[in-house]
Image (cartoon, rainbow, N blue to C red):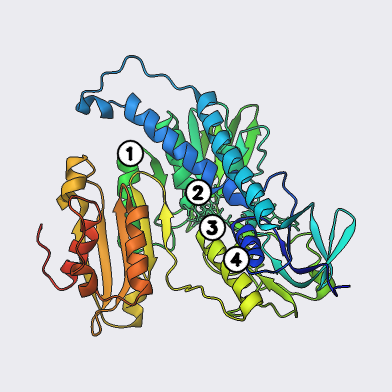
Amino acid sequence: MAEYDYDVIFIGAGPGGYVGAIRAAQLGLKTACVESRETLGGTCLNVGCIPSKALLHGSEKFAEAANGTLARYGVKLGKVELDLAALQADKADAVKGLTGGIEFLFKKNKVDWLKGHGTFKDAHTITVAGKDYTAKEVVIATGSSVTPLPGVEVDNDKGVIVDSTGALALSKVPDHLVVIGGGVIGLEMGSVWRRLGAKVTVVEFLDQLLPGMDGDIRKEAAKIFKKQGMDLKLGTKVTGASVKGKKATLTLEPAKGGAAETLEADCVLVAIGRRPNVAGLGLENIGLELNARGQIETGHDFRTKVDGVRAIGDVIPGPMLAHKAEDEGIAVAEYIATGTGIVNHDVIPGVVYTLPEFAGVGLTEEQAREKGEIKVGKFPMMANSRAKTNHEPDGFVKVIADAKTDKVLGVWAIATVAGTMIAEAALAMEFGATSEDIAYTCHAHPTHSEAVKEAAMAVTGKPIHI
Ligand code: FAD
Ligand code: NAD
C-alpha cells in the first residue's frame, strides 16, 4: 500500500490551486484539490477577474450606445435603455461556463476534487468534511478576501454597504455610489456603475490613485477619471458609517487630520485591499507562523518552514494577481515533480481594466531612479495613428531603460488596449531586451502597439511621429 493517499494535495481551487493541480497531474503526480466553494476557479472566476470583466465589457457597450459615441459612426439609435438583469445574466453565464470548464479539466486530468473546507491535522494530513486525506506534499493556495474597514460594516444582502462581491451583484443602479479606496477594484467597479448611470465618488486615503503604479500613470489616472465624471476625494479617510433604511451616511476626514464632513450615499463599496485566507486552516497544528502582514512566507521553491508544506498565490507575499498565482501554481508543481520551476517575480504585468486601461511591468520610474541612472522614453497615444483614428486620445507609453546598458527596466502604458500591449513589454523584459531591441522590432501598422516601439525609440531621442 502507498504511504500516502496522494503525491500532492492543493488546498484551494483558485488560479493558483487549480492550475497547479492540473500541472501536477500532467506531470504524473496523483493529485487532489480541496475546495469549499460550490464551484471551482476561486475568487478570480467566481467573484473577481471574470465577473468584473463581464460587467466592464457590458457597461462599455451600454455607454457607447447611450452617450452618443456610436452616432459619430453613423449608428442611429432610438431611446437606449438598460436591462440590468440581462447584463447580470450575461455575467453569470461567463462565470458558469468558465468554472464548469475547470471541473471538466479536473476530470480530464484525473484531479480529485475534495469538496469542503480543508484543515491541517498534521503536515501530511488534511481533514475535509470529516475525512482525513494524506499527501507527501501539501500546497496552500487559499487565496485572499476583502480587508474589513472598522466602523464600516459590509452587508452584501442589504446592498447598502458592500464589498466587491456585493458590487458585482447589485440589482439596481445606485444614484450615488461612494467607493472607499482608489485602487484597482474601486476604479474598475466605480467605472462599471458610473457608465450605467450612477454618480460615483471615490474616497482615497493617499494623495493619488492606484498605489504601486508609476507616478506619471497615477497622476494621469486622476485627470482621466475626473474628466469621465468621477468625483475624487484624495488624501481623505472614512472614519465611520451609519445606515438608515436604504441610505448610508459616511464621516470623512482629511487623511492628515482636520475638520470632518459627511457624505450621503445609497451604496458604499469598501475596496481598501485584500488579506490572506488562513482562518480555519489549522496552521497552529503544524506550527506554521505568519509574517506581520498575515502572509505565509516561502522560499524560491515555495517551501514554507514546515517540511512537506508549500504555499502559492494571494496567501504569500507579492502582487495579488491571478496570473502570478497561476505561474506559481505551474512552478510549484514542477518543483515537486522535477526539482525545478520558474517564476520571474521581477516581470509580472499589472493591468487596470478601465477605459482606457492602465498597465505596467517592471520598475516604476521612481524605483528605477533609486537603483541608478536611467533613460526614459515617452510617446503619447494622441500621436499614434490607430488611437487617433479610433478617437482614443488618452494616454501614453513610457519605456524606462538603464542609462549604461540600455536594458529595459520597466514599461508603463495608458491606452484603450494597454493590457494587451503590455504583454510584448513583458516578453521583451523576460528576454533581457534593450530599448534598442524594441525600437528595431517591426511592429504592424496601424496598431496601438506601435506606441511601444516609438516610446522605445524615444529612449535614445529618435521617435518619428512627434
Ligand atoms: P483565490 O482565487 O482566492 O482562491 C482560493 C480558493 O481557496 C477559494 O476558492 C476559497 O474558497 C478556497 N479556500 C480557502 N480556504 C480554504 C480551505 N481551508 N479549504 C478549502 N478551500 C479553501 N487578478 C487579476 O490578475 N486580474 C483581474 O482582472 C482581477 N480582477 C479581480 C477583481 C476582483 C473583484 C477581485 C476581488 C480580485 C481580482 N483579481 C484579479 C485578483 C485575483 O482574483 C486573485 O489574485 C486570484 O484569484 C488569487 O488566486 P489564488 O489561487 O491565490 O486564490
Ligand atoms: P488596492 O490595494 O488596489 O487599493 C486599495 C486602496 O484603498 C489603496 O489605494 C489604499 O490607499 C486605499 N485605502 C486603504 N485604506 C483606506 C481608507 N481607510 N480610506 C480610504 N482609502 C483607503 O486594493 P483593492 O482595490 O481592494 O484590490 C485588492 C487586490 O485585488 C489588489 O491587490 C489587486 O491586485 C487585486 N485586483 C486586481 C485586479 C486587476 O488585476 N485588474 C482587479 C481587481 C483586484
Q: Nearer the viewer, mark 1 or mark 4?
A: 4
Residue highlighted by disc 4: 329
- Residue with the mark numbered 3: 322
Q: Are marks 4 and 3 in contact (CB under 8 Å)?
A: no
Q: Does label 3 or label 1 sit earlier along the sequence?
A: 1
Locate residue 195 relative to residue 455 in the image: left or right: right
Spatial CA span between label 3 and label 2: 14 Å
Question: Tag 2's secondary structure?
Answer: helix
Categorize mark 3 by other alpha carbons within 10 Å: few (<14), some (14-19), many (20+): many
Q: Earlier in the sequence, mark 3 or mark 2?
A: 2
Q: Secondary structure at mark 3?
A: helix
In the image, the residue with mark 4 has its CB under 8 Å from the nearest atom of ligand 1:
yes
**Would you say the beta carbon of the disc 3 residue lies within 8 angstroms of ligand 1?**
yes
Task: State which tag comes first along the sequence, 2 or 1.
Answer: 2
Residue located at (24% from left, 79% from top) = 406
Closer to the camera in the image, 173 or 255: 173
